[in-house]
Amino acid sequence: MLTKRWWYGVIGVLLASALIFMEFPHSWLFFNLPGLLLVLGGTVAAGVLSYSLDTVKRVLVGIPALLQEHHPPAFRDGERLLRINQRLRRGDLRSAEEDALRITDPFLKSGVQSVLDGIKPDELQRTLERRVHQQQAHSQTEVQVLRTLAGFAPAFGMLGTLLGLVQMLGGLSQVQMGEIGTHMSFAFVNTLYGILAANAFFRPLAIKRENRAQQEMVMLGFGCDLISVLQERQNSAALEELCASPPFESLPDRPISSSLLSLSTPSTKTLIRL
């Protein structure tokens, strides 16, 4: 479901369109389908040249998800981790492995299974850091693609304006003086499309994707802490305290506060860097 903020944005666009129709007698000049296709198509094409086709396609396919209300998944594996820790301390490895298979979070599940497999602490730390860095690079790439598209859009809007002016000047001998203003306004609307595409679409989406990436890094850092405590075979009280205080649950889309981005646990501090 779309967020309330995006519905407010849609309502704002509709109100602005209604204002244009009421205030401007030639409001049809604001609708230039070839210019719109030039701005959007050129922006996407430039993005493909800057990155890879698969990367740009993945970002564009993910735009509908960015428009929807997003809540980080609630932490539901606390009790299961406590049981795994107790069974490990008793030496009941088989039962611990069965519980590990029921962990819902993929990152946490993989880390717990590595602990049960007897991986060395240094090797486990390198593995976790590699996975976090891969996710971080993945998220940063998507943010950069959206910011790049936001940078290209005004340029292609200006290109559409220049092409329109060139076309008008090329046929100036056949155009009556009263039609010059109409042709010029039809050309300049391409610049408007570029500015709107950049500042009302691609740039806000980049900010939303960056906020979600920060949320992902917070949760991955929390998972690293849980895995570290489990590997050290600490008493259940330490693990229970950590499980009882996840960084956030059901947090809506908004920038992460500085208190969450500077959590006190060492592993989280090291891993959360966007």
Image (spheres, rainbow, N blue to C red):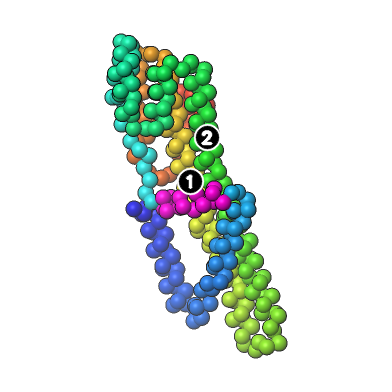
Verify whether residue 242 appears in magenta.
no
Query: Residue at position x 53%, y 32% from top?
Result: 133
Residue under label 1, please give it: 209
Q: Toward which corner of the image does residue 97 lie, by quadrant?
A: top left
Q: Secondary structure at mark 2?
A: helix
Q: Toward which corner of the image does residue 245 lie, by quadrant?
A: top left
Looking at the picture, how far across and down is residue 149, in whole percent?
57, 54
Looking at the picture, how far across and down is residue 164, in whole percent?
64, 74
Query: Residue at position x 55%, y 43% from top?
Result: 141
Earlier sequence position, callout 2 versus callout 1: 2
160 to 180, vertically: above or below: above
Tell me which segment is drawn in magenta: 53-67
Query: Residue at position x 39%, y 59% from top?
Result: 8
106 to 175, vertically: above or below: above
In the figure, is residue 176 to the left or right of 145?
Answer: right
224 to 202, vertically: above or below: above
- From this viewpoint, which residue is outermost toward the top? 90
Q: Which secondary structure dominates the residues rendered in magenta? A: helix
